[in-house]
Image (cartoon, rainbow, N blue to C red):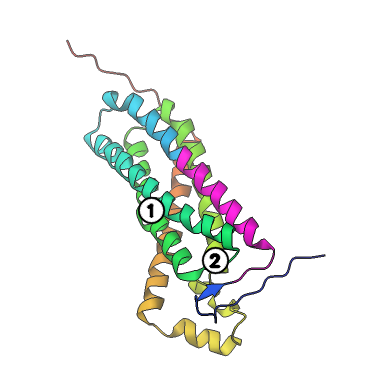
Amino acid sequence: MGWRLAFRDDGPNNSIEWAPPLRVIAVVTLFASTLDLMADFLLCSRIAEFLPNFQHQIAIYAAYGYFFFTGVSVLVYVFEMIDVCLTLKYEVENVFYARLAKSLVLAAEEVPLPTLLYILFTNEPRLSLASPVFISSWIKLVALTWGIVKFTKLRFCWICLPLNPKHDFRENLRRMTTLTLYRICMIIVNFCHILAIVIVIKNLIASAGGGRPIVVKETS
């Protein structure tokens, strides 16, 4: 017997009601976000270990930026977990809160962190950082891929708007091509999502071949 998915946002709370997959969606989001945050912390500890030996100033700036946005990601993580816990408790997901939480994750975490990591690793391609960067990038890629599923279910993915079951294809197409402030925000968030995936893939390619040993210069 398959799962049935029911959409409804005509209630007073402007919410989407899910059939059985609701708890699955929330639990997977919880697991993916937690694993992503743990990977960021582990990578921060690895970067901090070798930071005194960095030889390029831009890599040092990128490292400090990575530390800062990892701290920001903790606040965003708490915000997202509030949404997940409320969803698990009431078995109904608030559309506005869920969209806002995922948008904040993208804007304050998923775009800045991979970008700073790319700058850092391309300027300091150390063997000691290659493996942590590779593993962390894979985890982030999985989380971003799951984010596409989440946005599609929330009807906040612009290219998937024609799949909205509430309207016919012509009406969905009209809504897709009508640029309102809400639709522009959706497109910007979706663009950030694609950009984050591209940067993460570039990090995977850069770290897949390993780094190179860098001789530490001793000062007398």
Q: Assign the N terminus to one quadrant of the image.
A: bottom right
Task: Tell me: residue 86, above or below residue 178.
Answer: above
Quadrant location of the C terminus in the rendered image: top left
Q: Which residue is mark 2?
A: 93
Query: Can residue 19 be found in the magenta stretch?
Result: yes
Residue 59 in the image: above or below residue 199: above
Task: Give the foreground label among 1 and 2.
Answer: 2
Q: Residue at x 37, y 41 (%)?
A: 117
Which residue ends up furthest to the left in the rendered image? 220
Q: Secondary structure at mark 1?
A: loop
The amino acid on which the numbered mark 2 sits, given as a three-letter code, is: Glu
Does the magenta-highlighted stretch encompass residue 216? no
Residue 205 in sight in this render? no
Within 10 Å of the Cα at label 1, are there few (<14), some (14-19), or many (20+) other Cα atoms?
many
In the rendered image, which residue does mark 1 sit on?
111
Spatial CA span between label 1 and label 2: 25 Å
Is residue 187 or residue 123 the one in the foreground?
Answer: 187
Q: Residues within 10 Å of mark 2 (few under 14, many from 20)?
A: many
Judged from the image, the secondary structure of the residue bearing numbered disc 2 is strand
**Residue 61 appears in which quarter of the rendering?**
top left
Q: Which residues are magenta?
A: 17-38
* Left or right of residue 179, residue 17 in this image: right
Vertical position of residue 19 compared to residue 109: above or below: below
- Residue 71 on image: x %, y %: 34, 43
